[in-house]
Image (cartoon, grey):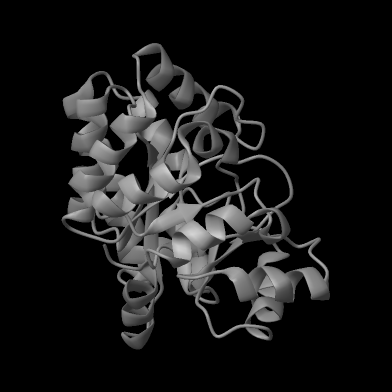
């Protein structure tokens, strides 16, 4: 079990941002998702984020919803998530991204114990706020698991400070209002949100929602400690003809994104913007 904080700080000490890659467990199958987590690692992700498929993903866009539906239709269970986490955690720090209802159904203490046993770093909980997270905070603190809560451009000063104070690992800054999904451009509100968050915490700040290309990853890496990519990677799998093609596509896209956050081929990635 390794916190994601040191991995992100190590990247920062190298003068770059960390890359966090997301894919759901059980998508397209449990074994297939294990292979795809390996593709994230091989492509250069510093941290892996494993999604727990849920039947009512109100904050997810159509791409991630489609992946969750595929995983659930294939019979993916919460216990399978721990298998997937274990496979990735052998190589890089690995978090689970989950809505809170499945954790409550599974049992908070039981979930925390099984996650820790699998080598998981902790949880990202998009629909759980610290005020309502006492049981999770206690279970996580007793096992030194990361607690990653979300802040948004609309988050006020007091709420921002409260949320950051309860995070461990990093603070997740959602760059745009609305559901997840790749976008044609990055959020203009994100740099200001990162600046405000850094005023209230020394934790790294990761930015997610909307990044889909190397160009966008490079833009976000210029001001964030971590660049979080999900929908674009899911789309790469959905568009592939089979698992072998999906592994190749995810590896290739992850490599592009990893190169971007490392500043490699920056001029080439930015193209005409160099002038």
Tell me what residue is drawn at x 28 percent, y 45 percent.
85
Tell me what residue is drawn at x 78 percent, y 68 percent.
159
Query: For residue 46, which quarter of the picture?
Result: bottom left
Look at the image and tell me in which quarter the N terminus lies.
bottom left
- The foreground one among 7 and 2 is 2
Q: Is residue 187 above or below residue 263?
A: above
Q: Measuring from the top left, give residue 23's x and y in whole percent.
A: 38, 40
Q: Is residue 115 above or below residue 107?
A: below
- The foreground one among 199 and 18 is 199
Q: Is residue 275 left or right of residue 185?
A: left
Q: How many marks?
A: 0
**Residue 217 visible, this orientation:** no
Q: Measuring from the top left, give residue 207's x and y in whole percent.
A: 55, 63
Tell me what residue is drawn at x 55 percent, y 42 percent.
182
- The foreground one among 230 and 141 is 141
Query: For residue 45, which quarter of the picture?
Result: bottom left
Q: Is residue 110 left or right of residue 196?
A: left
- The foreground one among 143 and 119 is 143
Q: Measuring from the top left, give residue 204's x and y in whole percent.
A: 50, 76
Find the residue positioned furthest to the top: 73
**Residue 13 visible, this orientation:** yes
Q: Is residue 150 above or below residue 84?
A: below
Q: Measuring from the top left, give residue 16's x and y in whole percent.
A: 38, 78
Tell me what residue is drawn at x 67 percent, y 60 percent.
130
């Amino acid at each position: 079990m390794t916190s994601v904080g040191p991995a992100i700080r190590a990247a920062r000490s190298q003068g770059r941002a960390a890359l966090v890659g997301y894919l759901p467990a059980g998508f397209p199958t449990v074994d297939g998702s294990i292979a795809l987590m390996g593709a994230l690692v091989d492509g250069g992700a510093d941290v892996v984020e494993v999604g727990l498929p849920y039947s009512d993903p109100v904050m997810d866009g159509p791409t991630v919803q489609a992946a969750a539906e595929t995983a659930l239709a294939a019979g993916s269970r919460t216990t399978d998530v721990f298998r997937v986490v274990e496979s990735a955690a052998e190589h890089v720090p690995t978090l689970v991204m989950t809505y809170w209802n499945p954790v409550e159904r599974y049992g908070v203490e039981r979930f925390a114990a099984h996650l820790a046993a699998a080598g998981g770093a902790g949880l990202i909980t998009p629909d759980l706020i610290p005020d309502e997270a006492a049981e999770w905070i206690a279970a996580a603190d007793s096992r030194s698991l990361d607690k990653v809560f979300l802040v948004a451009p609309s988050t006020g000063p007091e709420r921002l400070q409260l949320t950051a104070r309860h995070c461990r690992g990093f603070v997740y800054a959602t760059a745009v209002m609305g559901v997840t999904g790749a976008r044609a451009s990055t959020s203009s509100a994100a740099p200001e949100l990162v600046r405000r968050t850094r005023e209230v915490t020394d934790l790294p700040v990761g930015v997610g929602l909307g990044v889909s290309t190397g160009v966008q990853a490079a833009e976000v890496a210029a001001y964030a400690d971590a660049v979080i990519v999900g929908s674009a990677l899911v789309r790469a799998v959905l568009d592939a003809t089979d698992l072998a093609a999906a592994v190749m596509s995810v590896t290739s896209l992850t490599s592009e994104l990893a190169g971007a956050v490392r500043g490699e081929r920056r001029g080439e990635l930015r193209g005409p913007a160099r002038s």
